[in-house]
């Protein structure tokens, strides 16, 4: 059994950023040289999340619109009363999507669908330097 831990760092803006992480995750998987297993991704923090989507402008735009309908930025959030930071919506959005993903590895490749990419959703109302933790667990090729 092989376990490799690493991190991917990205800079975000003060809007709802949706960033494609597929290529950097593939690079970490290649370094790990695992044939069968899984890659586990986790983002620390309570205003960002991870998911998958077809990363093309129409789907990304649709996702942003759906997120705004689910938890509008301009709604009342009790969190804002306590901390006065104006990002209550970001906490709600991140909780809905969740902070982690686990993707099976078969024949040394992530088992993503043809049009499926890994994305970071950063909802915070200020720029951030985000750290995505990557853990590859599995067996090396024989």
Image (spheres, helix red, strand yellow):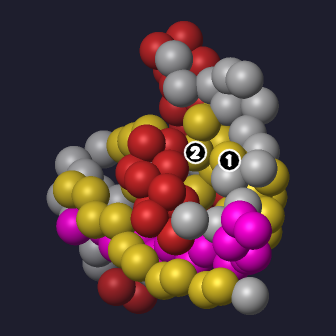
The residue at the point 49 percent across, 57 percent down is 30
Pick the front one: 88 or 1:
1
Where does the image place residue 55, in percent across and percent down from the top left?
54, 26
| Element under disc 2 | strand
Pick the front one: 117 or 137:
137
The residue at the point 63 percent across, 25 percent down is 54
Question: Compared with residue 126, is residue 22 higher up or lower down, i.e. above or below?
Answer: above
| Element under disc 1 | strand
Q: Which residue lies furthest to the front in this view?
A: 142
Q: In this view, does 7 lie to the left or right of 79?
A: left
Total labels: the figure holds: 2
Question: Compared with residue 15, is residue 114 higher up or lower down, i.e. above or below?
Answer: above
Pick the front one: 140 or 57:
140
- In magenta segment, residue 105: no
Please identify the dominant SS of the magenta region. strand
As drawn, the label of residue 109 is 1
Q: Which of disc 2 and disc 1 is earlier in sequence?
A: 1
Q: Counting other residues with Cα less than 10 Å from the Cα at mark 2, is it few (<14), some (14-19), or many (20 or more)?
A: many
The residue at the point 53 percent across, 31 percent down is 64
As drawn, the label of residue 118 is 2
Question: Compared with residue 84, is residue 107 higher up or lower down, i.e. above or below?
Answer: above
Magenta range is 129-142
- In magenta segment, residue 134: yes
Where does the image place residue 134, in percent across and percent down from the top left?
51, 73
């Amino acid at each position: 059994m092989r376990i490799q831990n690493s991190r991917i760092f990205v800079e975000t803006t003060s809007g709802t950023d949706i960033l494609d992480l597929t290529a950097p995750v593939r690079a970490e998987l290649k370094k790990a040289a695992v044939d069968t297993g899984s890659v586990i991704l986790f983002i620390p923090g309570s205003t960002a999340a991870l998911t998958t989507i077809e990363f093309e402008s129409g789907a990304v735009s649709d996702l942003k619109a759906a997120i705004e309908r689910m938890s509008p930025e301009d709604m009342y959030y009790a969190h804002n009363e306590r901390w006065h930071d104006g990002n209550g919506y970001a906490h709600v959005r991140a909780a809905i999507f969740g902070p982690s993903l686990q993707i099976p590895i078969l024949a040394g490749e992530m088992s993503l669908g043809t049009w499926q990419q890994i994305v970071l959703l950063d909802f915070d109302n200020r720029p951030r330097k985000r750290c995505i933790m990557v853990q590859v667990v599995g067996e090396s090729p024989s």
